[in-house]
């Protein structure tokens, strides 16, 4: 019976003449060509759109990009307004972010790859890390507002903002650390164990050393993201108009190092841009464009370095 | 000359050293464990803060009003607390964004994975990664000062703050993300499946559509879902360009506030800690967190499936 059915199905396929087959092949080749053209055009179109947007931004902001723009405080008059307090604030916050997120992220990544036993407890940590990287940044802002500002009473200060961005950056560092560590062959570890190294010695002298490039890539990408983040910083209460600088961290008299700047109010580059953008006057939009150019150049530079680094590592892998 | 054998230290000394060594190893492991636990603490912290602050809000406002009222005006004299207008704003902008990002992102992924030469792929992928890193506030600038004026030339009735422009730019913003996740999924399809298809005389296009895409479906769906999650959580573009007025509408030609835009708007002002307005952003944030959490879980489930398949 099965054979009958198969026969009847086969008989449905009409034999094709050579010309029909040729026509079919031509049609399929044409489809191939059409799709690959569409694909290429789509990509070119998308990249071109973004290029136009960037060129537009640079054209708008170009007249404002002079030396004074970096040394002036924000001002009520657009022509005199600059980003001094914004870039100083951004730098100091990035410092706090770096100090909190990097050691913790690398340590967590090392634990999950090298130490963690395979059990439900580790699974929970892993699920948490993957989930955290998908949480919208503004939620981190709400967490920081409730926790750092009103529970720990750190106030709306540089340390609060730095910690907030540190939390945001943590999953990125953890994930990239794990990926970098995973690419190191087990033989390296076995060789170290064979000459009597302890687990920590293996990790410190071999695993972290060899995966350093990959970890660095993740750190740079995370820092670039933290630099451009606006929403969580607004939520913890960045000021939009700041005409003073935080106290200097290094002084000429004893005790030479002061941490007062941690508790200073602040603004950052994206917030400065956002506040200028929210004003109705066109002159301030030019300032916003100039600030945008600075932000884009910084993030592109950082991300570009990271991607180049990753490419170098991939090329230089010896095992 | 006689070779003197190496003198071993007495057993007790070696043991003492081992004990010290093991002790330090344990301490280090515990420190590392605490670092790893930080991720869990952050999630717990988010849930704890959202729940405690929002519970203050729900003591004043009934959950039923919150979920069914079509007006959201917690800061006005005549206060209404219905989350629906914010949700409708969020869904409308996300929908517009996905209408742009899904088709273009998918086509770009198929092209990059199946058609593009090695050289093209190696030069386009880094650009995509660079674009994922562009700060969103810059995209807000593009929306307000470039895309919206352009759209207003086509349709003069369009208000300055509208969900269409914001949605389009968000879509452009998400394209690289969807394209690169979907491309990864397609690259993970084993080569022998393609070779089988080619051996049967199929063209590249037939192989891409009938073999590779179905095999990578769950990965592609994961890319879409993660894209949705990003669109829903996107803040600066909508806060700058979609409008600040909550209104219950699904018409992208109007302006409306999204959940994220509302939180930014309130945070920009100076609301006293513990007031109902202050608590309302946590209630809104909780809805946002649950929405994105749902999408993220779905996305990771889909992703896991494609990872285990082969």
Image (spheres, coloured by chain):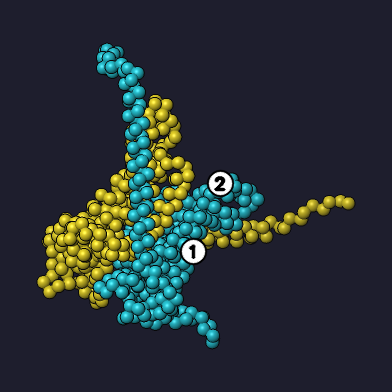
Give the colour chain A carries in the figure: cyan
Of the two numbered discs 2 and 1 on the same chain, state the one appearing first in sequence.
Answer: 1
- Occupied quadrant, residue A237: bottom left
Give the tally of numbered discs: 2
Q: Chain of mark 1?
A: A
Which of the pair A146/A266 is nearer the observer? A266
Q: Position of residue A217 (x, y in %)?
A: 49, 57
Q: Position of residue A96 (x, y in %)?
A: 45, 70
Give the colour chain B carries in the figure: yellow
Q: Residue at x 31, y 74 (%)?
A: A284
Q: Position of residue A233 (x, y in %)?
A: 34, 69
- Occupied quadrant, residue B153: bottom left
- Occupied quadrant, residue B171: bottom left
Q: Give the quarter of the figure containing the C terminus of chain B.
A: top left
Q: Residue at x 53, y 59 (%)?
A: B26
Left or right of residue A305, residue A144 in this image = left
What numbered label is drawn on residue A103? 1
Q: Is label 2 in a helix, a strand or a loop?
A: loop
What numbered label is drawn on residue A185? 2
Outermost residue toward the bottom? Answer: A253
């Amino acid at each position: 019976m099965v054979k009958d059915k198969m026969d009847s199905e086969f008989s449905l396929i009409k034999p094709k003449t050579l010309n029909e087959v040729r026509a079919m092949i031509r049609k399929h080749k044409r489809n191939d060509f059409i799709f690959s053209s569409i694909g290429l055009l789509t990509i070119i179109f998308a990249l071109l759109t973004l290029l136009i947007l960037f060129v537009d931004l640079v054209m708008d902001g170009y007249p404002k990009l002079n030396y004074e723009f970096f040394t002036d405080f924000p001002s009520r008059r657009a022509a005199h307004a600059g980003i001094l307090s914004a870039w100083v604030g951004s730098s100091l916050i990035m410092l706090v972010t770096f100090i909190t997120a990097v050691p913790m992220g690398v340590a967590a990544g090392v634990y999950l790859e090298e130490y963690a036993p395979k059990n439900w407890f580790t699974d929970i940590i892993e699920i948490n890390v993957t989930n955290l990287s998908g949480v919208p940044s503004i939620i981190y802002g709400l967490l920081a507002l409730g926790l750092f500002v009103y529970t720990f009473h750190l106030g709306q200060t540089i340390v609060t903002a730095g910690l907030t961005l540190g939390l945001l950056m943590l999953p990125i560092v953890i994930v990239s650390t794990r990926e970098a560590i995973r690419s190191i062959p087990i033989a390296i570890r076995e060789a170290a164990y064979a000459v009597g190294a302890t687990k920590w010695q293996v990790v410190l002298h071999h695993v972290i050393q060899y995966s350093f490039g990959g970890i660095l890539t993740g750190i740079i990408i995370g820092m670039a993201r933290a630099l451009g983040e606006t929403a969580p910083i607004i939520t913890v209460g960045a000021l939009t108009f700041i005409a003073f600088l935080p106290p200097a961290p290094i002084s000429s008299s004893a005790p030479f190092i002061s941490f007062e700047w941690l508790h200073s109010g602040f603004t950052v580059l994206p917030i400065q841009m956002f506040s200028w953008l929210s004003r109705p006057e066109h002159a301030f939009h030019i300032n916003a464009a100039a600030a945008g150019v600075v932000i884009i150049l910084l993030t592109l530079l950082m991300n570009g370095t990271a991607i180049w680094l990753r490419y170098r590592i991939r090329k230089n892998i010896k095992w | 000359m006689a070779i003197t054998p190496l003198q071993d230290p007495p057993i007790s000394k070696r043991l003492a050293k081992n004990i010290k060594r093991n002790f330090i190893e344990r301490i280090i492991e515990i420190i590392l464990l605490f670092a790893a636990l930080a991720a869990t603490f952050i999630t717990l912290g988010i849930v704890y803060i959202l729940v405690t602050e929002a519970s203050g809000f729900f003591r004043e406002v009934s959950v039923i009003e919150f979920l069914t009222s079509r007006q959201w005006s917690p800061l006005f004299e005549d206060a209404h607390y219905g989350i629906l207008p914010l949700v409708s704003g969020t869904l409308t902008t996300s929908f517009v964004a996905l209408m742009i990002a899904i088709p273009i992102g998918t086509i770009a992924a198929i092209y990059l994975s199946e058609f593009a030469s090695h050289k093209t792929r190696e030069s386009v992928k880094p650009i995509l990664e660079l674009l994922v890193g562009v700060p969103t506030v810059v995209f807000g600038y593009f929306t307000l000062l470039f895309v919206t004026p352009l759209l207003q030339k086509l349709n003069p009735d369009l208000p300055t703050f509208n969900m269409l422009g914001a949605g389009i730019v968000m879509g452009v913003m998400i394209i690289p993300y969807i394209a690169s996740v979907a491309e990864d999924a397609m690259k993970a399809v084993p080569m022998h499946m393609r070779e089988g298809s080619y051996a049967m005389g199929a063209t590249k296009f037939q192989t891409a559509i009938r073999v590779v895409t179905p095999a990578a479906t769950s990965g592609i769906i994961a890319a879409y879902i993660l894209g949705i999650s990003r669109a829903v959580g996107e803040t600066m573009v909508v806060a700058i360009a979609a409008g600040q007025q909550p209104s219950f509408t699904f018409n992208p030609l109007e302006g409306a506030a999204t959940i994220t835009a509302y939180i930014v708007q309130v945070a920009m002002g100076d609301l006293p800690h513990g007031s109902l307005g202050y608590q309302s952003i946590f209630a809104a944030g909780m809805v946002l967190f649950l929405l994105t959490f749902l999408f993220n879980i779905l996305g990771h489930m889909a992703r896991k499936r494609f990872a285990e398949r082969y």
